[in-house]
Amino acid sequence: MNLEKAMRLPLVEGGIVKVIIGAILNLIPIVNFLCSGYFIEIMANAIREKHEMPAWENWGDKFIRGLLSFVISVVYMIIPILLLVAGGISGFFAVLAVLTGLVMWFVLPMALARYAATGSTASAFEFNAVLSFIKAVFGAYIGVYLFSLVLFIGLTILAAIPVIGWILSMLGGFYIGCVLAFLFGEAYRKAAAGSSGTIGA
């Protein structure tokens, strides 16, 4: 994974303005589906080796992509949610919910990358294919996943600082989303190239 390129991507060629716009939109419920759609576009760009931040245009398309990515995420997390509802916040079911949730959260980025590549929500639920893509680039994929955990822990700590911390975490949250979308998109591209040579497979 090209970590340096991913970290620079949101900061060059007008990217900072796009990050600020995204950070503001991300604060507004429902409207923030636009941001999820934006991340899907970044994934699609990375998959096609198009290393640039998307423009803030085609708002309807962004909203639909974001809404569908939200639906995909909810479906992946439905089992952990149901286990948590069934068992409450303590006990066996709670532990099972956490473990299942961690597994689903690990798999979810590749599922979203498949959706970004194909434009088909059905491809995100082809579980065997999703797992085979993860397996094809497992070392790099788990590296990006652990990197994402470190970034979000850092963001949580930053958000605890009054005022300036909140502002920086707002901008940082969207920035991190852009970086990770690029990295997981790259992971998909490499897995696809290694498995079949067909990006939309």
Image (cartoon, rainbow, N blue to C red):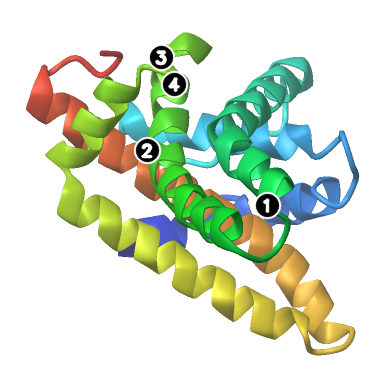
Q: Between disc 4 and disc 1, whose residue precedes?
A: 1
Side of 75 where 123 appears, left or right: left
Neighbour tally class for label 1: few under 14, some 14-19, many 20 plus, Cα within 10 Å: some
Q: In the structure shown, which secondary structural element does the residue marked by tag 2 occupy?
A: helix
Say the numbered circle drawn on residue 185: 2
Say the numbered circle drawn on residue 87: 1
Gap in angstroms between the C-alphas marked 2 and 4: 14 Å
Q: Residue at x 89, y 84 (%)?
A: 163
Q: Nearer the viewer, mark 2 or mark 3?
A: 3
Gap in angstroms between the C-alphas marked 4 and 1: 28 Å
Which residue is labeled 3 in the image?
123
x then y, percent, for residue 187: 27, 42
Which residue is labeled 4 in the image?
124
**Are circles 4 and 3 on residues that touch, CB within 8 Å?**
yes
Side of 147 where 137 appears, left or right: left
Q: Between disc 2 and disc 4, whose residue precedes?
A: 4
x then y, percent, for residue 44: 44, 28
Say the numbered circle drawn on residue 172: none
Neighbour tally class for label 3: few under 14, some 14-19, many 20 plus, Cα within 10 Å: many
Q: Tell which residue pokes out farthest to the bottom in this image.
A: 161
Gap in angstroms between the C-alphas marked 4 and 3: 4 Å
Q: Residue at x 10, y 24 (%)?
A: 195
Q: Residue at x 72, y 65 (%)?
A: 171
Q: In the structure shown, which secondary structural element does the residue marked by tag 1 occupy?
A: helix
Could one spot residue 54 in this view of the protein? no
Side of 196 where 2 appears, left or right: right
